[in-house]
Amino acid sequence: MKCISCGNDFEGNYETCPNCKAPMNPPATVNPVAQWSIALFKDKLFLLLCVLMSVSCGLDLIDKSFPLFTGLIAAFLWVVFAQAHKNIANTKFLRAISGTVFAQHIFLFVLAGLIALIGVLITLILSLASGAPDLINEILAKIGTVDGIPTEAVKVFISTSGSVILMTFILVAGALALINLLFLRPAHQLAKSVYQCIDKGVWELQKAGVVTGWLWVIGIINGIDALFSLPDGDILGALSSATLTGSLIITAILLGRYNIPILPIKNDER
């Protein structure tokens, strides 16, 4: 046998080294960051988060919408929760959550670009149409009316609405890009930092304060939307918004509770 403390070789089985008295089979070094993350994923609020996100996805499916990204995150959260109850801090599924948030981040950028492009194309078409009055008159003369709207009103719409449509599409695209930059990008950095912290043994979450603030803001907005959906009789929409509000607020509370820096233990502190 060889003592890992003093390096001496000797024959026989010993519980402690005959030379330095160090234990021959010392307990494995505990990663405090992994233990801290396991405590987070075992938290009852984390379980409630998994439940609320799953219910929100189910309600969206019943309402004939397909919450792809939310559904994937909910599924991965359940796996992380199950692994934590086996005292395993499995970074594989934490990476999957980070990747899903990043995919949503890219998707929104692409969507914002497409909306802006559609606005430009519609504006160009209307501009070309307004520049060819004879063609417009010929087409409208054959149509007569457009869904009961007089042809003169259609002419006015074509000649004046191009800039309004372009501005509307640009504003929508800009709003999506802004939300993406201010919320989803920090959210991805936060999700990425969770598994990196476990790997490095240092619990210092990135952008946790920024994401927490946005979670509260978006959660409150969703809660207000749920209240306004009730008078219209949109029960499914109200319940979906309410469960999403709950999951956002619970995530913010968990971040506030577990965003405590844990630094690596130095050798002289062991």
Image: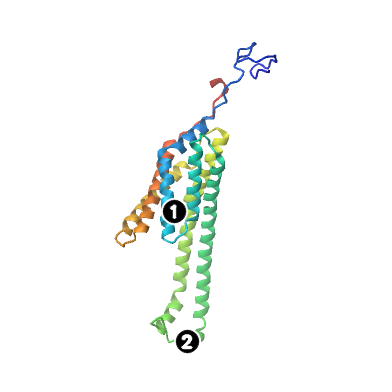
The crowding category of the residue bearing disc 1, from other C-alpha atoms within 10 Å (few below 14, some 14 to 19, many at least 20), is many
Q: Residue furthest top?
A: 19
Query: In the image, 249: left or right of 184?
Result: left
User: Who comes first in sequence, dot 1 or dot 2?
Assistant: 1
Q: What residue sits right under mark 2 in the picture?
A: 137
Identify which amino acid the numbered label 1 is placed on: Cys
Residue 57: numbered disc: 1
Residues under numbered marks 1 and 2 in contact, where contact means CB atoms less than 8 Å apart: no
Q: Position of residue 26 (x, y in %)?
A: 58, 21
The percent coordinates of residue 186 (x first, y second) are 50, 47
Q: Quadrant of residue 168?
A: bottom left
Around disc 2, counting alpha carbons within 10 Å, would you say few (fewer than 14), some (14 to 19), or many (20 or more)? some
At a point 52% along the width and 33% down the height, the residue shown is 34
Instruction: Determine the residue positioned at 57% across, 34% down.
Output: 200
Q: Locate the C terminus and report the quarter of the image it occupies.
A: top right
Question: Residue, x 50% and y 55% (percent of image)?
Answer: 68
Describe the element under mark 2 as helix, strand or loop: helix
Residue 156 at least partly seen: yes
Query: The N terminus appears in which quarter of the rendering?
Result: top right
Front residue (pair 209, 99):
99
Give the structural element (helix, strand or loop) at label 1.
Answer: helix
